[in-house]
Image (cartoon, rainbow, N blue to C red):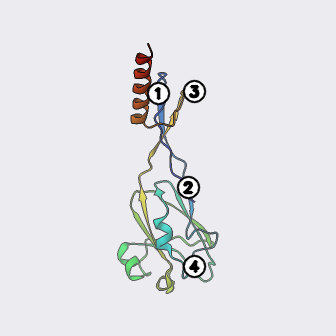
Amino acid sequence: MHVLPLLKCHGLNGAKPTIESREPVLHRVGGGRFTWAPDINFTDWSSKEHFYVGDWLYFGFDKHIYNVLEVNRTSYENCFDKEYIYNVTRGGRDVFNLTEAKTYYFLGGRGYCYKGMKVAVFVEQTPPVLHHSPGFKSYPYSSTNFIIILTMLATWTIISY
């Protein structure tokens, strides 16, 4: 799942915008319901997603065959599953909260890392989302475009008289 915040330049009627955090997003690792499995290109999947602090990862898999381990970069690169940071595995439909802006590393133990079951997730700080007071009108223009349009209207008004 992919959600990006939308920021806009807004009207000039005196109301002030408020800044709030965006809603957390649940990312299905690999893109599907049960896609924590061998032979899936998790690098390609993660490169197409945007991860922010507060988002969640969902790992769907057969817990009798696979597991999910959070590891450090060295363990990730070498498929080493012995000294993991955290065992995400609970029931095969497991979630992991991304609580810090950093790169998280996950792999499938029991040798499955060598079959492609590993993913690195780069997490960014949550960007602010502008929300506006009631009555605050929004315009789909950037601030530069808004100034240009305002200048053109003022020029047209002066020329018209």
Nearest to viewer (mark 2 / mark 3): 3
Task: Tell me: 70 left or right of 61.
Answer: left
Residue 107 vertical placement versus 9 (above, below)? below
Label 2 or label 3, whichever comes before in sequence order: 2
Query: What kind of residue is marked 3?
Result: Pro
As drawn, the label of residue 16 is 1
Distance (Cα) linking label 3 and label 4:
48 Å
Which residue lies at the image location 43% right of the left edge and 75% below the top edge?
A: 84
Query: What kind of residue is marked 1?
Result: Lys
Label 4 or label 1, whichever comes before in sequence order: 1
Residue 107, position in %: x, y?
Answer: 48, 76
Label 2 or label 1, whichever comes before in sequence order: 1
Residue 83 vertical placement versus 56 (above, below)? below
Pick the residue in front: 51 or 105.
Answer: 51
Residue 67 vertical placement versus 150 (above, below)? below
As drawn, the label of residue 25 is 2
Query: What kind of residue is marked 2?
Result: Val
Distance (Cα) linking label 3 and label 1:
10 Å
Label 3 or label 1, whichever comes before in sequence order: 1
Count of labels in the image = 4
Which residue lies at the image location 55% right of the left edge and 55% below the top edge?
A: 25
Q: Mark 3 = which residue?
A: 134
**Label 3–label 4 contact, CB within 8 A:** no
Distance (Cα) linking label 2 and label 4:
22 Å
Query: What kind of residue is marked 4?
Result: Ala
Q: Mark 4 = which residue?
A: 37
> SS at mark 1?
loop
